[in-house]
């Protein structure tokens, strides 16, 4: 059915009311635990959660936001072709016929998780559409490379999937950046003329940032007193120990110590960007067998007591509980070995025991 009814002035005519009924039917499949959904009337603009019958009345009384023709808060998805201002390239489309690659599906999950088919969570706010253009540019670039063959006629790899597989090999083998660049250079020489492979590890890191794996580097005091941010962003030395921020004798102001901040919010959102991971994240509520046998943290009395005390939190099956783990050392015992770095891992607790992160010392 056409969405032209949204712009009708007579909101009591049959066509408009039929459109309202169509919307309510779609919205009824995407309600929160209290049976509410976002109200797209001109007054609420998808900011407020209301019962379905109230939403129907508001749409009739106030009218629906006229630009809300793709019901992204009520189960529909953006069309990839509409998410970018970049023109389509027919030559690329013709080359990608028959290309078997799951990168485009992954990127589709990312877009739907951000703007379409997004879970309706009680009390959440409307997405910040001021960043929509920037995000779509990144996704459009990733989607383009996910559909761009590594070379003309390649059926096995897209530009993005091949780079991701190389990066996975780098992580598994713990190889250096220099070795990665050398391998890239060698592969480029071996590929046919017209190959689309990236030229350096720097470009690969740009991919990682676009995929939501980015981090922020912050200069730190070498004695661990302060981080040089906020009011200390321009400081040259530590206000606690007076130690210089930069390595003495270096002309380019190289920090003696740096900290890397990995945003938690982006990583938690990414856990719900694919159906498989989202299913694992809800395992503790949807699939766990509760037979009074202690096999998982969710079976413990502490977990259940928390559920009772904070029922508003536990009622949402997508709730996330995190644990801080250390791998390979005891911070409270006597340690005979000296290390310059300790591995500390933040991991979700709600997943099945076989799905949690395991490190080399586990």
Image (cartoon, helix red, strand yellow):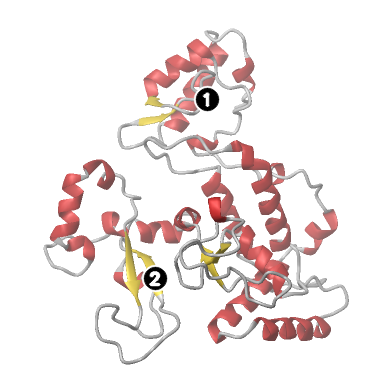
User: Where's residue 324, x and y in %?
Assistant: 33, 67
Mark 2 and mark 1 lie on one chain; the one further toward the N terminus is 1
The single residue placed furthest to the left in the displayed view is: 292
| Quarter location, residue 205 | bottom right
Q: Which residue is mark 1?
A: 45
Residue 124 visible in the snapshot: yes
Vertical placement of 271 versus 244: above or below?
Answer: above
Query: Disc 2 vs disc 1: which is toward the camera?
Result: 2
Say few, some or many: other residues with alpha carbon within 10 Å of mark 2 (under 14 / 14 to 19 / 20 or more).
some
**Residue found at x 15% / y 68%:** 294
**Residue found at x 35% / y 91%:** 337
The single residue placed furthest to the bottom in the displayed view is: 336
Secondary element under disc 1, as helix, strand or loop, is loop
- 270 to the left or right of 177: left
- 155 to the left or right of 211: right
User: Where's residue 63, x and y in %?
Assistant: 54, 15
117 or 331, nearer to the observer: 331
User: Where's residue 36, x and y in %?
Assistant: 36, 30
Say few, some or many: other residues with alpha carbon within 10 Å of mark 1 (under 14 / 14 to 19 / 20 or more).
some
**Residue found at x 61% / y 9%:** 9
Q: Contact, CB < 8 Å: mark 2 with mark 1?
A: no
Q: Which residue is mark 2?
A: 345
Residue 158 visible in the snapshot: no
| Quarter location, residue 334 | bottom left
User: Where's residue 216, x and y in %?
Assistant: 57, 61
Vertical placement of 317 versus 263: above or below?
Answer: above
Vertical placement of 15 versus 181: above or below?
Answer: above
**Residue found at x 27% / y 54%:** 285
Q: Quadrant of the image for the N terminus?
A: top right
């Amino acid at each position: 059915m056409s969405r032209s009814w949204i712009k009708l002035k007579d909101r009591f005519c049959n066509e408009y009311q039929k459109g309202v009924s169509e919307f309510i039917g779609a919205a009824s499949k995407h309600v929160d635990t209290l049976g509410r959904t976002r109200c797209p009337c001109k007054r609420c603009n998808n900011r407020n959660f209301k019962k379905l019958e109230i939403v129907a009345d508001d749409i009739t009384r106030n009218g629906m936001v006229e630009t809300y023709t793709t019901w992204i808060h009520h189960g529909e998805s953006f069309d990839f072709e509409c998410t970018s201002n970049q023109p389509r390239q027919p030559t690329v489309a013709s080359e990608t016929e028959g290309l078997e690659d799951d990168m485009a599906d992954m990127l589709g999950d990312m877009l739907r998780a951000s703007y379409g088919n997004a879970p309706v969570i009680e009390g959440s706010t409307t997405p910040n559409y001021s960043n929509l253009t920037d995000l779509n540019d990144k996704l459009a670039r990733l989607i383009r490379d996910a559909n761009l063959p590594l070379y003309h006629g390649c059926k096995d790899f897209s530009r993005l999937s091949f780079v991701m597989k190389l990066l996975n090999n780098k992580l598994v083998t713990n190889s250096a950046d220099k070795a990665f660049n050398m391998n890239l250079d060698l592969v480029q020489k071996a590929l046919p003329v017209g190959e689309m492979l990236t030229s350096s590890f720097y470009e690969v890191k740009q991919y990682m940032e676009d995929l939501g794996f980015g981090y922020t580097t912050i200069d730190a005091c070498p004695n661990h007193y302060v981080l040089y941010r906020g009011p200390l962003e321009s400081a040259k030395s530590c206000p606690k120990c007076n130690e210089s921020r930069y390595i003495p004798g270096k002309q380019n102001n190289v920090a003696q110590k740096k900290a890397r901040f990995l945003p938690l919010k982006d990583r938690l959102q990414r856990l719900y960007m694919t159906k498989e991971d989202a299913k694992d994240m809800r395992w503790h509520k949807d699939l766990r067998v509760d037979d009074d046998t202690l096999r998982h943290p969710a079976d413990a009395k502490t977990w259940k007591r928390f559920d009772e005390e904070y029922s508003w939190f536990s009622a949402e099956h997508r709730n996330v509980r995190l644990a801080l783990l250390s791998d390979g050392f005891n911070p409270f015992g006597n340690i005979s070995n000296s290390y310059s770095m300790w591995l500390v891992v933040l991991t979700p607790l709600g997943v099945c025991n076989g799905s949690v992160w395991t490190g080399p010392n586990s």
